[in-house]
Image: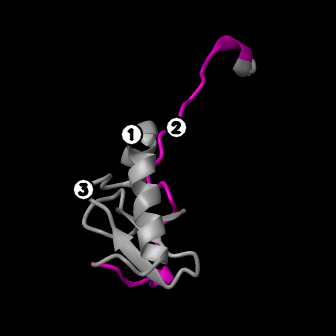
């Protein structure tokens, strides 16, 4: 299963499922609107994403369009970060 984030009106982009050859992309907003949303609910959504992938690769899916890699964002355009400011990680000045 290949997933990508495409440019959209949101900073997180739009999650799409890609064919193995990277020629077609299918948006899956009914499953997960963004990659972060998919990761947050992976156990719930991964079987559905896998089914879309299988159908897409078998040519059984409506709503797919040519994949333009120039429209792709990083997979997690706004991934969460953790800043550790604990004592053991700071140096004395």
Rendered-image quadrant of the N terminus: bottom right
Predominant secondary structure, magenta span: loop
- The residue wearing badge 1 is 44
Observer-nearest residue: 70 or 39?
Answer: 39
Q: Give the magenta-colored segment's residue range.
A: 63-88
Quarter of the figure with the C terminus: top right
Residue 55 coordinates in the image, percent (x, y): 42, 70
- In the foreground, 17 or 71: 17
Of circles 2 and 1, the one toward us is 1
Magenta span has 84?
A: yes
Q: Residue at x 32, y 52 (%)?
A: 32
Please say if 79 is above or below 85.
below
Q: Where does label 3 land, which residue?
A: 30
Image quadrant where residue 66 sits: bottom left
| Marks 1 and 3 close (CB-CB < 8 Å) | no
Reply above or below: 56 against 93: below
Q: Are marks 2 and 3 in contact (CB under 8 Å)?
A: no
Nearer-N-terminus badge (2/1): 1
Residue at the disc numbered 2: 81
């Amino acid at each position: 299963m290949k997933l990508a984030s495409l440019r959209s009106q949101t900073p997180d982009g739009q999650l799409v499922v890609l064919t193995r050859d990277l020629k077609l992309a299918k948006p899956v907003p009914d499953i997960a609107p963004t990659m972060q949303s998919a990761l947050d609910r992976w156990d719930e959504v991964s079987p559905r994403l896998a089914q879309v992938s299988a159908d897409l690769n078998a040519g059984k899916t409506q709503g797919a369009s040519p994949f333009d890699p120039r429209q792709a964002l990083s997979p997690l355009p706004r991934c969460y970060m953790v800043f550790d400011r604990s004592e053991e990680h700071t140096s004395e000045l």
